[in-house]
Image: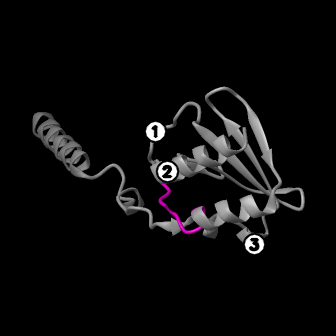
């Protein structure tokens, strides 16, 4: 009788292990969904055309450039505000940046962007944004 009971327990344990190993460890479908693209200006709280100061950091040499020329700021904003950004929280962390740009309105920092992140959230690398940042930086050396 004990041998018979032992066999049943063993078979039951094996079945439970097999069934549990066949289940997906994470049934969360959010990891499979591709984040929807958004225009850069949608990350800005308020009206992006009201930016009055841009602070740029060059990861190449550590220089910081402050831009206050309203005409130049508005021209650059017009070029970048419609760029499509795609957040990618599953992307690996990157070390360092090519350029980092902070947008200010009346002394308040409103948005921080780089070619690989926006407000500290990782995104798919954006080469066009990197080129526009490079142009702005080089125009203000």
Residue pointed to by mark 3: 46
Q: Marks 1 and 3, Cα distance to the nearest angstrom?
A: 30 Å
Q: Position of residue 57 (x, y in %)?
A: 70, 38
Considering every residue shown, the one lying at the far bottom of the view is 47
Of helix, strand and loop, which one carries label 2?
loop
Q: Position of residue 74 (x, y in %)?
A: 72, 65
Q: Residue at x 33, y 49 (%)?
A: 25
Q: Position of residue 96 (x, y in %)?
A: 59, 31
Question: Label 3 crowding class (10 Å Cα cut-off): few <14, some 14-19, many 20+?
Answer: few
Instruction: Look at the image and give the residue range highlighted in magenta.
Output: 80-89
Q: Position of residue 7 (x, y in %)?
A: 12, 38
Q: Nearer the viewer, residue 136 or 59?
A: 136
Considering every residue shown, the one lying at the far top of the view is 61
In the image, residue 82 lies in the stretch drawn in magenta = yes
Residue pointed to by mark 2: 89
Q: Marks 2 and 1, Cα distance to the nearest angstrom?
A: 8 Å
Q: Could you tell whether 64 is left or right of 42 in the image?
A: right
- Residue 76 appears in view: yes
Considering every residue shown, the one lying at the far right of the view is 106
Residue 35 in the image: above or below residue 1? below
Of helix, strand and loop, which one carries label 1?
loop
Q: Residue at x 63, y 32 (%)?
A: 59
Q: Residue at x 11, y 34 (%)?
A: 3
Q: Could you tell whether 132 is left or right of 73 in the image?
A: left
* Quadrant of the frame with the C terminus: top right
The image's mark for residue 92 is 1
């Amino acid at each position: 009788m004990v041998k018979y009971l032992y066999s049943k327990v063993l078979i039951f344990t094996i079945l439970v292990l097999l069934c549990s190993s066949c289940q997906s460890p994470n049934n969360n479908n959010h990891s499979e969904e591709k984040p929807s693209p958004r225009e850069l200006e949608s990350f800005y709280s308020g009206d992006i055309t009201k930016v009055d100061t841009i602070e740029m950091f060059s990861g190449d040499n550590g220089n910081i450039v402050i831009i206050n020329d309203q005409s130049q700021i508005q021209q650059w904003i017009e070029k970048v505000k419609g760029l499509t950004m795609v957040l990618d929280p599953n992307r690996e962390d990157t070390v360092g940046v090519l350029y980092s740009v902070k947008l200010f309105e009346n002394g308040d920092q409103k948005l921080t962007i780089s070619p690989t992140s926006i407000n500290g959230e990782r995104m798919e690398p954006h080469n066009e944004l990197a080129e526009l940042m490079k142009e702005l930086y080089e125009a203000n050396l």
